[in-house]
């Protein structure tokens, strides 16, 4: 219902006032866009089994979502060479919902990542994350 109200509110924002766009309406439209998601960046999803030796390209603010296939989402850990460039978020389960592990790009640069499985038996997965500015 909120989305319908916001869309309805946006429909009147482009009215003209003496040949110029209504600046108050434009400001209101910008504020409403921020409320409904604004500049959301889609995550990049890559299966853990395909990461070894790869470079994953992200923009600042984007997330690499690691698909763990049939392995427990909470069983992965990561060591990131430069935590100023990217940070790891461990996967977990909460009330039946499953959240996959991921790497969030925080600053421009390239860093090496080593992904390990806590139960052992799997070789560490080494890959790079290259982060560019958000355009």
Image (cartoon, helix red, strand yellow):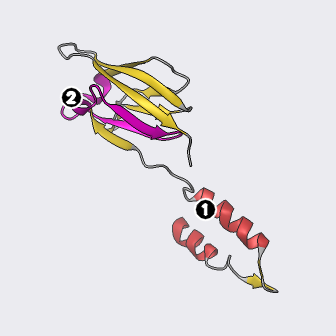
Verify whether residue 68 appears in magenta. Answer: yes
Residue 134 percent location from the top left of the image: 56, 45
Instruction: Quadrant for residue 16, please give it.
Output: bottom right
From the viewer's perspective, is 114 left or right of 105?
Answer: left
Q: Which residue ends up furthest to the top in the rendered image? A: 120
Residue 31 percent location from the top left of the image: 68, 60
Whichever of labels 1 and 2 marks the residue nearer the N terminus, that label is 1
What range of the chain is rendered magenta? 48-75
113 shown above or below 22: above
Cβ atoms under marks 1 and 2 closer than 8 Å: no
From the viewer's perspective, is 120 left or right of 35?
Answer: left
Residue 7 percent location from the top left of the image: 56, 72
Residue at image x 49%, y 35%?
131
Verify whether residue 106 appears in magenta. Answer: no
Residue at image x 56%, y 23%?
84
Q: Which residue ends up furthest to the right in the rendered image? A: 18
Q: Residues within 10 Å of mark 2 (few under 14, many from 20)?
A: few
Q: CA distance from mark 1 to mark 2?
A: 38 Å
Nearer-the-camera pick, 47 or 75: 47
Residue 29 percent location from the top left of the image: 66, 67
Q: Which residue ends up furthest to the bottom in the rendered image? A: 18
66 shown above or below 114: below
Query: Which dot marks residue 102?
Result: none
Residue at image x 53%, y 67%?
3
Is residue 96 in view from this perspective?
no
Instruction: Quadrant for residue 33, please give it.
Output: bottom right
Secondary element at image label 1? helix
34 shown above or below 44: below
Q: Which residue is mark 2?
A: 71
Q: Which residue is mark 1?
A: 33
- The mark tally for this picture is 2
């Amino acid at each position: 219902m909120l989305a319908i109200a916001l869309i309805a509110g946006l429909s009147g924002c482009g009215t003209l006032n003496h040949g110029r766009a209504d600046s108050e309406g434009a400001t209101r439209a910008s504020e409403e866009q921020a409320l409904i998601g604004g500049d959301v960046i889609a995550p990049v999803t890559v299966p853990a089994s395909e990461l070894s030796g790869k470079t994953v390209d992200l923009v600042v603010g984007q997330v690499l979502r690691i698909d763990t296939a049939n392995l427990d989402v909470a069983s992965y850990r990561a060591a990131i060479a430069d935590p100023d460039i990217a940070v790891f978020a461990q996967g977990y389960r909460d009330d039946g919902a499953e959240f996959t592990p991921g790497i969030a790009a925080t600053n421009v640069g390239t860093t090496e990542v080593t992904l390990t499985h806590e139960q052992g038996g799997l070789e560490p997965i080494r890959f790079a994350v290259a982060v560019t500015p958000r355009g």
